[in-house]
Amino acid sequence: MFDIQNYTSFVLAVLVFQLVPGAGTIAILNATARHGIAVGMAAVLGTLLGDFIMMFAAVAGLAATMQANPMLFQALQWFGAGYLCWMGWQLLRTPVNTAPASQTEQSSPRVYFRQALTVSLTNPKVILFFVAFFPLFIQPQASALTLAVMMAHVTVLSLLYQAGLVLVGNAVAARLKTLPSARKIATRLAGLALIGFGLKLAANNR
């Protein structure tokens, strides 16, 4: 279908890729838990835009350029690790107000959009993943349109999964609000998770 070989396997592989939790997932859940569905969806859009840029870069051959220049690849990895740790540290040290978020806080989704976008763009391994992933499902006679269709599949499936993540996360957050310290605990755990992802990325970069 669409010159994609093993189409069913391709769709399943994309879904499995989404199910593996990462820093983007934490960013989306943190935004949702703190400010609700609208802000959570802003983080989703940031993640989707970052992934789309990475896919486009992979198709355009930037991965080959990065492989030819290992210092550039390592610099992006260190920057990404540092940014994740910085975000996590901010969540650990910032006082958490257990009262409902103010209207001003709720009306600023662009902050979480930028955070999610930066998290996605500072993981250059995503480019290499797509470089290795797409050729597995492209038929030899496929045209450039096939790659566009594959990118559209990844984007749409990611949107559906991450939107569902926001809805579930918001429902869980609403229930946890009945516990006085739930918001603080969730924020601190999100901070620790982001630092953990950052340290893992740094360790892999050594």
Image (cartoon, rainbow, N blue to C red):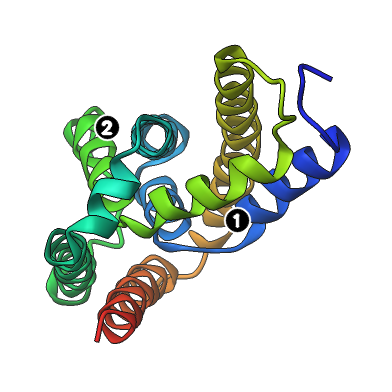
Task: Give the residue type at disc 1.
Answer: Val
* Residue 116, x across and y down, in percent: 31, 45
Residue in the picture at 85% in, 38% down: 6
- Seen at 79% across and 46% down, the residue is 12
Can residue 201 be spotted in the picture? yes
Estimate the x, y position of residue 203 in percent, counting from the top left: 30, 86
**Residue 122 visible to an observer of this rendering:** no
- Circle 2: element type: helix
Q: Earlier in the sequence, mark 1 or mark 2?
A: 2
For residue 92, what is the image quadrant? Answer: bottom left
Considering only vertical position in the picture, is 80 above or below 192? above
Q: Is residue 70 above or below residue 10?
A: below
| Distance between mark 1 and mark 2 Cα atoms | 20 Å
Q: Amino acid at mark 2?
A: Pro
The disc at residue 48 is: none
Q: Secondary structure at mark 1?
A: helix
* x 43%, y 32%: residue: 59
Q: Is residue 116 left or right of residue 80?
A: right
- Which residue in the rendered view is the most extreme toward the front? 140
Q: Is residue 169 left or right of residue 195?
A: right
Q: At x 83% / y 44%, what residue is drawn?
A: 9
**Rendered location of residue 162, percent (x, y):** 57, 41
Is 176 left or right of 51, judged from the image as shown?
right
Q: Is residue 33 left or right of residue 17?
A: left
Near-viewer residue (68 or 106): 68
Task: Write down the residue under mark 2.
Answer: 109
Q: Which residue is mark 1?
A: 172
The answer to which image quadrant residue 93 occupies is bottom left
* Number of other residues with Cα within 10 Å of mark 1, as a class: few under 14, some 14 to 19, many 20 or more: few
Horizontal and vertical percent position of residue 76 = 17, 60
Q: Quadrant of the C terminus?
A: bottom left
